[in-house]
Image (tube, rainbow, N blue to C red):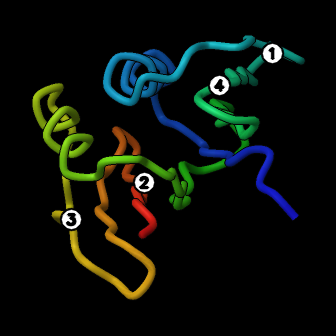
Amino acid sequence: MKVIYATIIVKDMDESVKFYTDVMGFEVDSKHNPFPGLTITLLKGEGDAMIELIKDTENEIALFSVGMEVEDINATVKELKSKGAKITREPTKITIGTLAFLEDPNGATIVLIQHH
């Protein structure tokens, strides 16, 4: 089984899209407004998985964790910090590699992992 998307309910679509494109390096794949009060933006990074940002009047902002694999975690964290990202856990060694956490504008946790 592989992840095809992660969904984040956002409070501010423009701020969230800016974060994921300017800071995290994703590209906008598509935008949808299926009905009044609902906006969906799909973002594509490396690989097949996508991030789905949803802004609507029905759901509260939801905290989700999004895992992203990186090749050089120290360089990635340094680059993200230079772009203003809020790092909530500096690179930490674990049994399968090294991980770090950062937070998006909605409080969602993004987990970066570099495998051995």
Residue at the image position 50 percent from the left and 52 percent from the top: 69
Residue that appears at 13% across and 40% down: 78
Which quadrant is the C terminus positioned in? bottom left
Query: Is label 1 in a helix, a strand or a loop?
Result: loop
Q: Which residue is mark 1?
A: 36
The residue wearing badge 3 is 91
Residue 108 in the image: x percent, y percent? Answer: 44, 53
Q: Tell which circle, 4 or 3, labels the residue nearer the N-terminal end.
A: 4
* Residue that numbered label 4 is attached to: 44
Q: Amino acid at mark 1?
A: Pro
Check disc 2 and report the residue beneath it: 110
Q: CA distance from mark 1 to mark 2?
A: 29 Å
Which dot, 4 or 3, sits closer to the camera?
3
Mark 1 or 2, closer to the camera: 2
At label 4, the amino acid type is: Lys
| Residue 36 horizontal side relative to residue 101, left or right | right
> Which one is nearer the viewer's eye here, 63 or 27?
27
Q: What number is the disc on residue 56?
A: none
Badge 2 amino acid: Ile
Classify residue 23 by image quadrant: top left
Q: Is residue 98 above or below residue 81?
A: below
